[in-house]
Image (cartoon, rainbow, N blue to C red):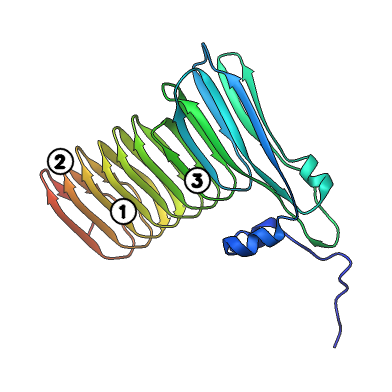
Amino acid sequence: MRTLPLTRLALPLLTLASMPAGAWDLYCKFNAQREASIDTTGAERVEIIARGGDLHVRPVQGGRLQASGKACASREEYLAQTQVHARRQGQVVQVFVQVPEEMQGVGVFYATIDLDVQVPGELPVDVTDTSGDTTIDRVRLARLTDSSGDIMLRDLPSDVEISDSSGDIRVENAAGRVTVTDSSGDIVVRGAREVLITSDSSGDIDIERVAENVRIENDSSGDIEIAGIGRDVAVLVDSSGDRRISQVKGAVTVPAH
């Protein structure tokens, strides 16, 4: 039997993402705290660009944004290149995570930051995240673009647009419209003014307590459950899965299976 050489073996960071928390600590070989802060006076928007690692965004009083977190890396040189920065671009405040551009050799390589960002509550926020779970509480989240990992959004005071590749999405108590474009994973909305799902490839959809309309434009697979809707429900395309729709004050429009 032929044996493959190990000199070029490298496992990507994503193979570590599924490990239990205790196991992950064993692999946080080199670690350090990272911090950045910036005055937001006069700013109109905040942009957060995260990479690997969990992300938590929450409001803070005053006019200063603060970001902090624990950086973990497999090598000292990778740790040195793993940083968090805050800067001003005109009237936009940006927070972004820097990780090594290239990691190669023999073994398992990783560089990640679990980031906590405190944002002045009156500023709209756009978030772009690569991997890891995302939790956002009580901030004016305008847009979230996420590649992988679960999403939890709570007590949002304004409209929000969510674009997600994989992982579950849960929204609790959004004062505005929730718009979702999703590839895979469950979608749960508990409380919103309005819900629009433009497309959902796979995973269940569960929507409750919506003051106005619910509209699902394209659902490929997975069950749909909708209850407690103040106006109309419209499901335009639903390829497969069960549907349970109840307690709707307006009209219900669904396609035939």
Q: Position of residue 244 (x, y in %)?
A: 20, 60
Q: Is residue 29 above or below residue 127?
A: below
Name the side, left or right, on which 65 lies relative to 112.
left
Quarter of the image for residue 32 reads: top right
Name the side, left or right, on which 199 lies relative to 14.
left
Q: Position of residue 211 (x, y in %)?
A: 19, 38
Mark toward the start of the polypeptide (2 vs 1): 2
For badge 1, the amino acid type reads Val
The reply to whether dot 3 and dot 2 touch (C-beta < 8 Å) is no
Q: Which residue is at 77% across, 44% downward?
A: 79
Q: CA distance from mark 2 to mark 1?
A: 22 Å
Residue toward you, 52 or 69: 69
For badge 3, the amino acid type reads Thr
For badge 2, the amino acid type reads Gly
Residue toward you, 5 or 41: 41
| Front position among marks 2 and 1 | 2
